[in-house]
Amino acid sequence: MTTPAERAERARQLWNAGDLPAYVQLYAEDLRFHGVEPDPMDKPSAIGFYQLFWAALGAPGRPNPQLDFYETLVDGDLYSCRFAVSGEHRGDFMGVPATGRPYVLEGITIMRFRGDQVVERWTTADFLGLMVQLGAVPAPA
């Protein structure tokens, strides 16, 4: 069995290689993913979100956005990191038509592992900042 840090890093590499099906193997079938929608997402809902995200916010010349991890912390079965996802806005996302603008979406996530898979994840990301970068809303004064 690998450590949570090794498993998360391997998943990040799969994401950046453009292999979404392999990336989502990180998640257990009974996944509870908090923070993107009002209610926790299950695994099929998380996959659907990622497919939409990839279609709308890929990196130039790639099918997927770039994913980077910073300041990783591990405590037993918990893995946490600050992350950044970057690319260009090339499809409808959250009601905003493609703008071609570059973006960087930053956030923090905590994942609880059971063995080699994530069973629960809590994520907070700066979606307001993303909407400002895409020109969908004005920057706060």
Image (cartoon, helix red, strand yellow):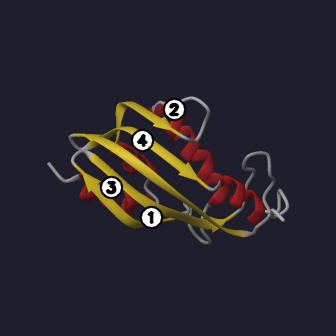
Q: Amino acid at mark 2?
A: Met
Q: Residue tagged by mark 2?
A: 41
The image position of residue 99, as x and y in percent, is: 80, 63
* C-alpha gap between disc 1 and disc 2: 23 Å
The image position of residue 10, as x and y in percent, is: 31, 59
Quadrant of residue 121 in the image? top left
* C-alpha gap between disc 4 and disc 1: 20 Å
* C-alpha gap between disc 3 and disc 1: 12 Å
**Callout 1 crowding tier (Cα within 10 Å): few <14, some 14–19, many ≥20:** some
Q: Which label sits in the foreground, 3 or 1?
A: 3
The disc at residue 8 is: 3
Q: Residue tagged by mark 1?
A: 16
Q: Which label sits in the foreground, 1 or 2?
A: 2
The image position of residue 40, as x and y in percent, is: 52, 31
- Reading the chain from its start, which is encountered first: label 3 or label 1? 3
Q: Amino acid at mark 1?
A: Asn
The disc at residue 121 is: 4
* C-alpha gap between disc 3 and disc 4: 12 Å
Q: Amino acid at mark 3?
A: Ala
The image position of residue 137, as x and y in percent, is: 83, 57
Q: Which label sits in the foreground, 4 or 1?
A: 4
